Image (spheres, rainbow, N blue to C red):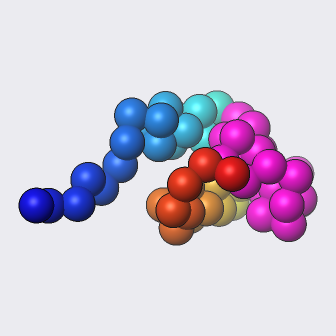
Amino acid sequence: MAKVVSSNWDVFLYLLAIILPPVSVFLKKGFKSEFWINICLTILGWIPGVIHAWYVISRSEGAM
């Protein structure tokens, strides 16, 4: 049986990452280092924050 690539929750997080990247990383990982890295990247520029958020969402196995 084929593995599901993304759940509905992940699709929601991808869309949320476009608007608020740190919030999507927080919902996926909590207050871990990825969240703080994303805060810094978003402050430096919106696009690096979005790219990092998408990376975190795609590399994570499950929410928190």
Residue 45, x across and y down, in percent: 78, 54
SS assignment for the magenta stretch, majority:
helix
Residue 23, x across and y down, in percent: 75, 38
Left or right: residue 43 compared with residue 17:
right
- Report the residue that reaches farthest toward the front: 1
Q: Is residue 39 visible?
A: no
- Identify the residue at horizontal 55%, vertical 38% (top origin): 13
- Report the residue that reaches farthest toward the left: 1
- Identify the residue at horizontal 70%, vertical 40% (top origin): 27
- Identify the residue at horizontal 80%, vertical 49% (top origin): 30
Total tally of numbered discs in the picture: 0
Quadrant of the image occupied by residue 35: bottom right
Q: From the viewer's perspective, is residue 19 above or below residue 57?
A: above
Residue 38, x across and y down, in percent: 79, 57
Q: From the viewer's perspective, is residue 54 above or below residue 23?
A: below
Q: Is residue 13 magenta?
A: no
- Identify the residue at horizontal 37%, vertical 42% (top origin): 7
Nearest to the observer: residue 8 or residue 39: 8
Left or right: residue 32 compared with residue 5:
right
Q: Is residue 24 magenta?
A: yes
Quarter holding the N terminus is bottom left
Nearest to the observer: residue 41 or residue 4: 4
Q: Is residue 29 visible?
A: yes
Q: Which residues are magenta?
A: 20-43
